[in-house]
Amino acid sequence: EVFARLREVGDEFQRLQMYYQFGIDEVSTKIAILRDEFATMYDYNPIEHVRSRLKSPDSLLSKALRQGVDLTVPAIRASIRDIAGIRITCSFVSDVYWIAQMLSAQPDLTVLTTKDYIANPKPNGYRSLHLIVQVPVFLSRHTEHIPVELQIRTIAMDFWASMEHKLRYKYSADMPAHLRAEIDDAARVAADLDARMSRLRDEVRPNPTDDLTDGAPGAPG
Ligand code: 0O2
């Protein structure tokens, strides 16, 4: 009896993983299309790297336990929105908003939440634009609506976040004060670098993505 139940749960989780991978595949294709179209039409690439990941069963389980979510597939699906994650890295801040706007405007994507940690950085200096978008995945017998977490950021934001993540992981709760101060300072330097790079780029040539996001909500001036 117990064995049969365990097997059932195992199968359910495997199916869950597959659906979320399909969600990643759908949104990744959209990103690749925008990237290729832009490279062809404007000889300009607003996207530097794209990386995707499916949350591992271990980290899914520990997040569910941490948040007091019932350990059932429906409860996990309803409460944990970053099972599928895609991180997009751009050169310039304006490109970050451009990608977000292009994806949000697609009729089959529904934006569930937006967290703009660029306009409002976290207290530790973390900057990034986070969107949870829901994409339909058409299967043989039914349609699944899959949430995908997008983290869109510049190279400088990404560099800072990966360093901060490593240090936080290494020191967990007791980060020495001088490291905390270094991280704060590095966040300021990264934000300054983004501002300088945007100014330099504007000198070289107007960015094609600027025209397309002119007057868009959330797009910087
Ligand atoms: P991992 O290992 O990267 O997946 P929650 O998703 O519930 O934890 P919240 O507030 O709903 O938290 O989500 P939020 O603030 O949008 O952030 C979720 C993800 O953003 C994190 O996932 C990190 O990847 C990244 N992030 C957020 N804040 C920071 C930060 O201060 N430093 C760094 N380096 N990354 C950050 P996970 O699941 O925490 O980690």
Image (cartoon, rainbow, N blue to C red):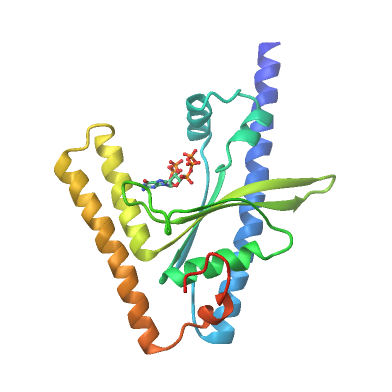
Residue 11: x, y in percent? 68, 30
Question: Ligand 1 falls in which quarter?
Answer: top left
Residue 190: x, y in percent? 29, 62
| For residue 172, side relative to residue 40 (left or right) | left
Q: State the residue in front, 189 or 151.
A: 189
Furthest residue to the left? 178
| For residue 140, side relative to residue 128 (left or right) | right
Q: Is residue 58 above or below residue 154?
A: above
Residue 102: x, y in percent? 61, 68
Picture residue at 47% right of the left edge, 82% below the top? 207
| For residue 175, side relative to residue 19 (left or right) | left
Label count reads 0
Picture residue at 52% right of the left edge, 41% below the top? 55
Picture residue at 54% right of the left edge, 70% below the top? 98
Residue 50: x, y in percent? 49, 62
Q: Is residue 103 above or below residue 215?
A: above
Q: Is residue 191 above or below residue 203?
A: above
Q: Is residue 186 above or below residue 19?
A: below
Q: Quadrant of residue 15?
A: top right
Quarter occupied by the N terminus: top right
